[in-house]
Amino acid sequence: MSLSGRVALVTGASQGIGRACALKLAASGATVAVAARNQEKLAELVQQIETTGGKASAFPVDVADEEQVKTAFKTALGQLGKIDILVNNAGITRDQLVMRMKRADWDSVLNTNLTSAYLCIQQAIGSMLKQRWGRIINITSVFGQTGQAGQANYAASKAGLIGLTMAIAREVASRNITCNAVAPGFIETAMTSGFTEDFRQTALKAVPLGRVGTTEDVANAVEFLASEEASYITGHVLNVNGGMLMG
């Protein structure tokens, strides 16, 4: 699956799933714009990609800030000329039972996980429409499909991403632009590293494949959806969850 000649922008690229996606897309031949808040980690990622023969540029941005998003995309488009592939991966959690959840924590998660995807799509879509080719890939979650106690804000934001994916897919399909989502399950990342061993063992019992997923598992799905081989797939949610949710 060659992505040679394509330009991809990945949000939340400084670590975890976003970093793995950036590395995978670069390895497939794409020029990768990596975007996140942590400039130091972005610089390290760019260096790693370039060391292995790939092409990458860093664009520091807080995706919850509309003006920063506009500036980052304007700079990326000016520098790289176009955006063919957009991976909306940036996400946070602020877990709490709904009766105790603060409005600020609700707003923060919805802004970072959902509103940012709308903002990024809005900034990238012009380039895709102009060239009549594009791939938009939103990273949602199994909990956006099943819900999760203590994560009303997170589950709502990830469920919203699924609805956004389907709406955008219908809007831009006639221009040869696809919009899909990837829904990871229990993946080994910094976000899950704080779980207790008891919780991990309980969670694993719900995974038929019997193991925690890797960021590479998710990146492989993103690479496929970004490729020509996935040109007839749009409005789809690709589950990468080891069988936690089927059907």
Image: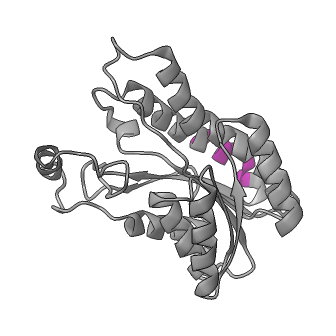
Q: Residue at x 54, y 51 (%)?
A: 89
Q: Residue at x 44, y 27 (%)?
A: 153
**Is residue 2 toward the left or the right of residue 124 in the image?**
left
Q: Position of residue 94 (x, y in %)?
A: 41, 31
**Is residue 27 toward the left or the right of residue 153 in the image?**
right
* Residue closest to the eye, 120 or 207: 120
174 is higher (above) or lower (below) than 32: above
Taking the magenta stretch, the answer to whether it contains residue 169 is yes
Q: Give the residues in magenta.
A: 166-173
Quadrant position of residue 226: bottom right
From the image, give the main secondary structure of the stretch colored magenta: helix
**Is residue 37 toward the left or the right of residue 84 in the image?**
left
For the question of whether residue 49 can be seen, the reply is yes
Residue farthest to the front, as pictured: 40
Quadrant location of the N terminus in the rendered image: bottom right
Q: Position of residue 236 (x, y in %)?
A: 51, 52
Q: Residue at x 26, y 59 (%)?
A: 242
67 is higher (above) or lower (below) than 17: above
* Residue closest to the eye, 148 or 47: 47
Taking the magenta stretch, the answer to whether it contains residue 170 is yes
31 is higher (above) or lower (below) than 72: below
Q: Position of residue 41 (x, y in %)?
A: 56, 62
Residue farthest to the top, as pictured: 99
